[in-house]
Amino acid sequence: MKLLIRNLSRSTTEAELRTLFEACGRVQSCTLVMDQASGLSKGFGFVNMPSPGEAKAAMKNLNGQELDGNRIRVKKASPPASTSDAAET
């Protein structure tokens, strides 16, 4: 299950995020979204956990937890909007 993590500190690293989520279960991937111009984090990222049960536990236990001075928000990531839907007007 892919989780969206918001309100991350710009100084939070992928390694820190992975370590936090590994306390709840196996992490398949962890990605911070970076600003291409500045190279800095945009303050959100994604964690993919293969076990839905572990992902739900992570959402419950980590949502609102403080990380690097920020209270993070954790929820299930929505699938990206289809570009073909926007073209059909």
Image (spheres, rainbow, N blue to C red):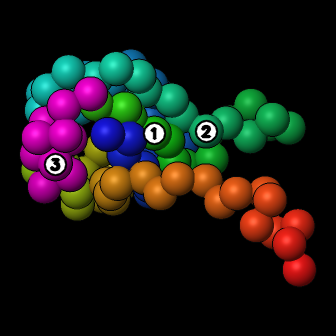
Left or right of 78? Residue 86 is right
Q: Position of residue 70 (x, y in %)?
A: 36, 54
Q: Is residue 72 visible?
A: no
> Split into 4 quadrants, where in the image is the C terminus?
bottom right
Question: What residue did someone put label 3 on?
Answer: 56
Closer mark to the observer between disc 1 and disc 3: 3
- Give the residues in magenta: 50-60
Question: What residue did someone put label 1 on?
Answer: 46
> Label 2 to label 3, Cα distance in Å?
22 Å
Left or right of 31? Residue 82 is right
Left or right of 21? Residue 84 is right
What's the amino acid at mark 1? Phe
What's the amino acid at mark 3? Lys
Closer-to-camera residue (14/2): 2
Question: What residue did someone put label 2 on?
Answer: 33
Tell me the SS state at disc 2.
Answer: strand
- At label 2, counting other C-alpha atoms closer than 10 Å, the crowd grade (few under 14, some 14-19, many 20 or more) is some
